[in-house]
Amino acid sequence: MFDLIVKHATLPDGREGIDIAIKDGRIAAVEAGITAEAGEVIDATGRLVTPPFVDPHFHMDATLSLGLPRMNVSGTLLEGIALWGELRQIVTREELVERASRYCDLAVSQGLLAIRSHVDTTDPRLVTAEALLEVQARVKPYIDLQLVAFPQDGYFRAPDGVKALDRALDMGVNIVGGIPHFERTMDEGRASVEALCRIAADRGLPVDMHCDETDDPMSRHVETLAAQTVRFGLQGRVAGSHLTSMHSMDNYYVSKLIPLIAEAGMHVIPNPLINIMLQGRHDTYPKRRGMTRVRELMAAGINVAFGHDCVMDPWYSMGSGDMLEVGHMAIHVAQMAGVEDKRKIFDALTVNSARAMALEGYGLQKGCNADLVVLQARDPAEALRLKPVRLAVVKRGRVIARTAPRITALALEGRPVRIDGSVDHAPVR
Ligand code: FE2
């Protein structure tokens, strides 16, 4: 007797007609034709069943604050940072908790069950850290929420940057962030990478830095991050977020840099929606896309995981917590539309992100946590194309969100009566 069986699923690797049996919060069997009884059965015939979506880069302290205290008029990264600096001074813990909690509800409905959020540590009051630690505890039963101590205004540049980051780590925020390209000088940026990697080594923590989020091809802090990762023995525990300057770098230099990133076992986290929105803003025409070199990094065997970064905040007025929207944009910006390309993009929203966040028990193999999503789509390519309804979201064997399938009733002479939103060229019987 199982708790739940998901029947006749199509898996991301292409296997069809697979049953997934769940017992005591874990996946007990993954095979065709399971006949045992179960407390609940979900018929997933012809539907893609995937492990949950994972967002390795987000800002939950700023989310859903669009328009507060005013809009970003220029639409630039720098005005966004200034605007957030205004809001940060007046925001309360209660407001932060309320907005972050609302975002977590949205995430669950989208099958997004693990999120790594940066927490701005610039304001020494650290209400951001207090609020997000509270949210982390509150959502623990259904979202793995990781928190990064992020010195938004610069580790050395902000008046209390060094002390405040240390205090946030003491409070229980347990990933070390950074923003070397925003420090006053290249030298201070380099020094910040070294200091922050040293802290991570001393405290036994991972590192996830906003790194080279600029169009300046001479912003080369990723090189330092790779070197310090090796120096401090942090291989596999360090992520470089954004790395947009790589888009504009000289090809010869990149041919040296990518092997350094691979050697350091760094995870790379581009944020396609935000990169295409914010980079190249100082260009006239042609305008650069700005996203880092995804295809080349993947080809070098580097773990590339996509982040959502922002939803309705000073930097980005759009977004819906849907990682498939992120993947959809990645396909366009990276120009990765081939069959194998789309499979890799889907991995970058799921398994690669889980790896970047070092999630345990993630996947659809026997013994993994019973966390999965049933989509109104037949396969990963169709999911990326249609961003379909998440029919069921399961956490530890329990259905925590359901959405009705999208089906349109046509009133057209001689046409099928109903159209299934996942199979837009075939009628529903
Ligand atoms: Fe970010």
Image: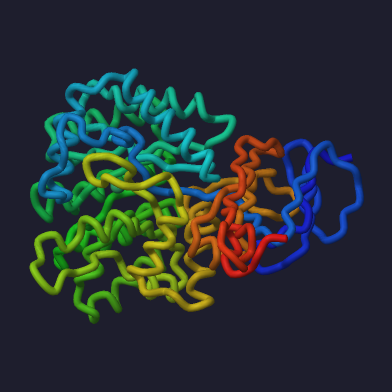
Q: Is residue 394 above or below residue 417?
A: above
Give the camera-side residue of 359 and 311.
311
Q: Residue at x 32, y 45 (%)?
A: 310
**Residue 133 falls in which quadrant of the image?**
top left
Q: Residue at x 34, y 59 (%)?
A: 272
Give the camera-side residue of 361 and 64.
64
Give the camera-side residue of 319 and 265.
319
Q: Is residue 337 above or below residue 418?
A: below
Give the camera-side residue of 369 and 315.
315
Q: Is residue 95 above or below residue 78?
A: above
Report the quarter where the N terminus lies.
top right
Report the quarter where the C terminus lies.
bottom right
Percent coordinates x, y for residue 184 in the rendering: 9, 47
**Residue 130 falls in which quadrant of the image?**
top left
Percent coordinates x, y for residue 76 in the rendering: 15, 51
Task: Please state if 270 lies on the left or on the right of 397 as rendered.
Answer: left
Question: From where the camera sits, is residue 349 visible?
Answer: yes
Q: How many marks?
A: 0
Q: Residue at x 30, y 78 (%)?
A: 255
Question: From where the camera sits, is residue 197 visible?
Answer: no
Percent coordinates x, y for residue 154 in the rendering: 17, 41
Q: Is residue 365 above or below residue 27?
A: below
